Amino acid sequence: MTYFCFSDIHGHKELFDKILNWLNGRTDEWKCYFLGDACDRGEFGYSIIKTLLADNRFIYMKGNHEDLFSRAAKQLKQRWLEDGITKAMVTADPETYIMNYYWYDEVALHIQNGGLSTLIAWAADGSPLDIIGKIDRLPKHIILPHEVWGSLDLSHAGHLIDESDDLLWSREHFHEKWRGGRMIHGHTPVRSLMKYEVIINPAATNRPAFYQDGTKICIDTACFSTNFITVLNLDTFEQHCFHTEPKEE
């Protein structure tokens, strides 16, 4: 069995399809950890969520955008129920029935973070709560044994050694060297690590960043804007990079 991981696909279906085709074309058995943020920004996030949930070869972990989606979807369902808005009404005109409730806090927060396409696709699919329940149960933190490093610590955002900060949103841990293994996270694009003065002039901002003496790896390469994403081999740390051409405006 070969183990891989990637993160922050953000609805980029063309890149996701390239990764899936590559994995399916392998001759060995594989498992792939996805470290969160399948949805938002790109219009195909909801379909990617459904694919990840349905395929047990993926170990799907929660990101902050899955959390935003879940909270907004539950708020919409509650408001629609209170106002007598039926599933058939929403399915027939999802964008209208979402935007009519834009000013509710969770809905607004999700849309402001690129979630409108995700909510529309979910509503057009009948606004199923079972999908939301599955998202709510996704793991936030997984520790794997590793032959060389002892252990690999996986989460969407990373965290401080004492795990005192939020696994979905943290940017507090960057200056802390990991101990007792190696941490792998997404959430903050590699190019943004320069802003936090964690790394200076990385060789390539569209490739994973190995930092803090190699004890941490950031694998978010902002694929929605760069069109680059990397699948990391969790045994060897070999990088399998995928790229698409930018779409013409």
Image: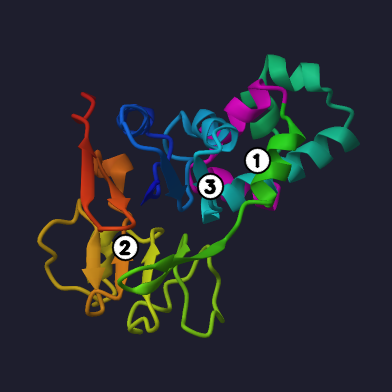
Residue 220, image quadrant: bottom left
In percent of width and height, residue 16 lies at 37, 33
Looking at the picture, which amino acid does disc 3 mark? Answer: Tyr
Indicate which disc residue 57 carries: none
As helix, strand or loop, the secondary structure at mark 3 comes to strand
In this rendering, does residue 132 appear at all? yes
Residue plotted at (45% across, 48% down): 34
Quick one: label 1 or label 2, which is nearer the N terminus? Answer: 1
Point out the frontmost of discs 3 and 1: 3
Q: Are circles 3 and 1 on residues that touch, CB within 8 Å? A: no
- State left or right for residue 31 relative to residue 199: right
Residue plotted at (31% across, 72% down): 216
Quick one: label 3 or label 1, which is nearer the N terminus? Answer: 3
Is 109 covered by the magenta stretch? Answer: yes
In percent of width and height, residue 22 lies at 30, 31
Q: CA distance from mark 3 to mark 1?
A: 29 Å
Above or below: residue 85 compared with residue 130: above
Q: Return the residue nearer the eye: 27 or 16.
A: 27
Q: Return the residue nearer the eye: 90 or 63.
A: 63
- State left or right for residue 107 relative to residue 28: right
Point out the frontmost of discs 2 and 3: 3
On the image, numbered disc 3 is attached to which residue? 60
Looking at the picture, which amino acid does disc 2 mark? Answer: Cys
Question: Which portion, as a residue range, is magenta?
Answer: 103-126
Above or below: residue 132 compared with residue 203: above
As helix, strand or loop, the secondary structure at mark 1 comes to loop
Q: Residues within 10 Å of mark 2 (few under 14, many from 20)?
A: many
Quick one: label 2 or label 3, which is nearer the N terminus? Answer: 3
Residue plotted at (18% across, 29% down): 245
Is 24 covered by the magenta stretch? Answer: no
On the image, numbered disc 1 is attached to which residue? 102
